[in-house]
Amino acid sequence: MLAAIRRLPRTVWLLGLISLVNDSASDMIYPLVPLYLTSVLMAGPKALGLIEGVAEAAASLLKLAAGVLADRSRRTKAWVVAGYTIAGIARPMLAFASSWFGVLVCRFADRIGKGLRSAPRDAMLVHSVAADQRGLAFGLHRAMDNAGAVIGPLAAAALLALGMPLRHVLLTAIVPAVIVLLLTLTIEEPQIERVPNPPRFSWNMREFPPRFRRYLLVLALFMLGNSSNMFLLLRAKQLGLGDAQVPMIWALVSFVAAALSTPLSGLSDRFDRRKLIVGGWTIYAVLYMAFGLMPAMTWLLWPMFAAYGVFLAATEGAEKALVADMVPKTQAGTAFGWYNLIVGLALLPASLLFGWLWSEASPPAAFAFGSACALAAALLLHFWVGASSDAA
């Protein structure tokens, strides 16, 4: 596998490096948002669910539009540069928020940036590798992304431990943002095949195979129970984890995901990707039930969050590689736009419902709902969605 990794083209490595630096900034801030909301701005789970749900859902429409336009223009670089730039500017602005609405505005701008870059970047990866390298390419990208997610929380924990105020920690995210902008400018535009009569965009997705549409429906069910990861961090704090340990435990998740993403996603190039995803979703279902029912034993949180990293490693790259398997290469941008739209739109009701169940019923009820959705989605993916095949 090491030889296969070395053979991956420069674009894959460069996009991975950009994600590493970008996520160093993003995940330095991400685990601090619940702390900032609850300890500085005095907001609760309902506000957190609203912020994350609205930001992700609104940005999802941009993910689809950017993907469609990238396919039409056969250009992806401009979207990638713009997306990373907007997000890089938005994150440090959290330090100036004086209410939960200010946090909402900053998170919204951050997700707008992600919306502009996500589908074109994934399409760029598809156009840069052969069909039998897709799992490996997406796995490497996710591994480097998660490596940045290890660096970020560790940096945040170190700065907090040294006594730096929370607002000042948020401001330091401007440094990696500048590095990301410089790196994106060096990306080379991939050669994209011109299609004489490209299929017209339609909201019913009739231009795509039925198998792909079924896959998106199943994914929507899973995402309905997959609320913002910030609820996991909030639960960990509720069970007794200290403020300085919150970013550390999220760094553990990212470390495990970074270590396993490449080999697990690469394995999916040899076998049916669905089986890997089903296994990951099953792990998620078990973990969510456990998070809801576990007693206040902080030592147990560490292996559970590590197992959550295994779930991410098994699914993040394989889910995207499965998208590429199911659609023609020239429609990759639009397909990833739909994929990201489904993921983002489902996060709004998922986060709102999770926050409501947490507040009005109990945390175990909220986690049980997420577990049930994941288990049902895993069964449907195995029995209802057809076996993947290369559509390129």
Image (cartoon, rainbow, N blue to C red):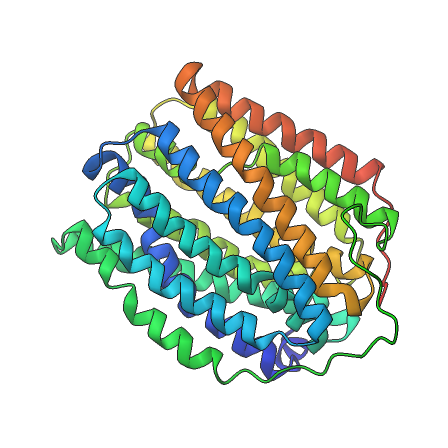
Q: Report the front residue among 93 and 17.
A: 93
Q: Is 141 placed left or right of 247 in the picture?
A: right
Q: Is 216 placed left or right of 196 in the picture?
A: left
Instruction: Please tell me which residue is depicted at 27% across the width and 60% down the height of the picture.
Output: 155
- Residue 338 is situated, as x and y percent measured from the top left of the image, at 69, 52
Q: Is 382 placed left or right of 3 in the picture?
A: right
Q: In this view, does 296 lie above or below 9?
A: above
Instruction: Please tell me which residue is depicted at 65% across the width and 72% down the height of the picture.
Output: 124
- Residue 16 is situated, as x and y percent measured from the top left of the image, at 52, 71
Q: In this view, does 161 lie above or below 69?
A: above
- Asked if residue 268 shows in the view, the reply is no
Quadrant assignment for the N terminus: bottom right
Q: In which quarter of the image is residue 226?
A: top right
Count all numbered tags in the image, as a single digit. 0
Instruction: Please tell me which residue is depicted at 48% across the width and 56% down the height of the picture.
Output: 112
- Residue 367 is situated, as x and y percent measured from the top left of the image, at 51, 26
Q: Report the front residue among 287 and 67.
A: 67
- Residue 388 is situated, as x and y percent measured from the top left of the image, at 84, 54
- Asked if residue 111 shows in the view, the reply is yes
